[in-house]
Amino acid sequence: MTEDAAGPDEGLTVGRAAALVGVSVRTLHHWDEIGLVRPGDRTWAGYRVYSGEDVARLHRVLVYRELGFPLAQIGRILDDPDVDAAAHLRRQRSEIVERIAQLQRMVGAVDRMLDASRTGMRLTPEEQVAIFGDDWRPEWVGDAEERWGDSAQWAQYAQRAAALDPADWERVADETAAFEAALAAARRSGVEPGSSEANALAERHRALMGTYFECTHSMQVCMGRMFTEDPGFAAHFDALAPGLARWWRDVLFANAAANGVDPLTAVWE
């Protein structure tokens, strides 16, 4: 039995605990190393696993971290037997209420920006087809807004795209076409995911996405999944070169791993 295959009654492995509470495996390893949350149980095979109490402590750590407490201070709060838990809860509640008010103000600002710029695509449907080619469908912009319109990245896109004129969009279209041609050429020439050439393509893609929003390696992993799981994206890439969608996903996964992101647990952040 491997470390990730603990039985249902043996506690949670680090991978399962990370997925449950929404952090990376690397984060849990770090918290273990500094003594903040250490898995206290072991499987029959000797692997360390998180008990129910350990998971409850993880959740408490996340609450304090979300409120801005340094990890060292969180450890002292959780381990001090003289701490007034009720007083801390009241303080947490007060700070959460203030955080909610702050987030509501941010949401209002984003809503106003979205109302002003909507999709950010200020081109007419005819201009979009002329710039992006006959395969372009203007309704894709609305589909994208419906899919991602609630994200912070869409707000960034709307703000940045609204500042682009037709000449800017032509430049973006040319850069995208050149990049996709480079992807297809790399696939055909046998470039291996994880190689320096493949990683350079992944970073070039991240810079290209920067036209619209700040793109992290974790976000690229999510895109890589979408490129193979969404039939439309898969068909688009595979039309450029056979097997390109899966190869491109593997390239993004390998580059993310080289930059400290676990592709198995990466989320849109």
Image: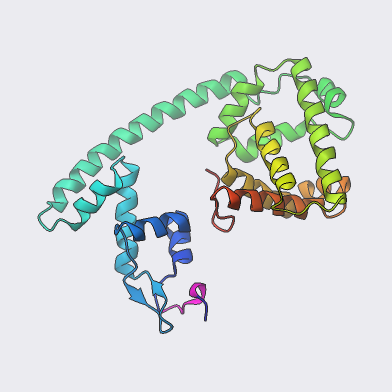
Report how many numbered discs are placed on residues in the image: 0
Q: Quadrant of residue 236?
A: top right
Residue 96 visible to an observer of this rendering: yes
Residue 243 at x, y percent in the picture: 83, 55
Q: Which residues are magenta?
A: 3-9
The residue at 39%/32% (across/down) is 103
Residue at the far right: name it.
Answer: 134
The residue at 78%/15% (across/down) is 167
Q: Is 221 displayed left or right of 232 in the figure?
A: left
The residue at 78%/32% (across/down) is 176
The residue at 63%/44% (across/down) is 220
Residue at the far left: name it.
Answer: 82
Magenta-colored stretch includes residue 7: yes
The foreground one among 72 and 219 is: 72
Q: Quadrant of residue 58?
A: bottom left
Residue 147 at x, y percent in the picture: 64, 40
Magenta-colored stretch includes residue 168: no
Q: Is 15 displayed left or right of 195 in the figure?
A: left
Residue at the far front: name it.
Answer: 196
Residue 241 at x, y percent in the picture: 87, 49
Colour mode of the rendering: rainbow
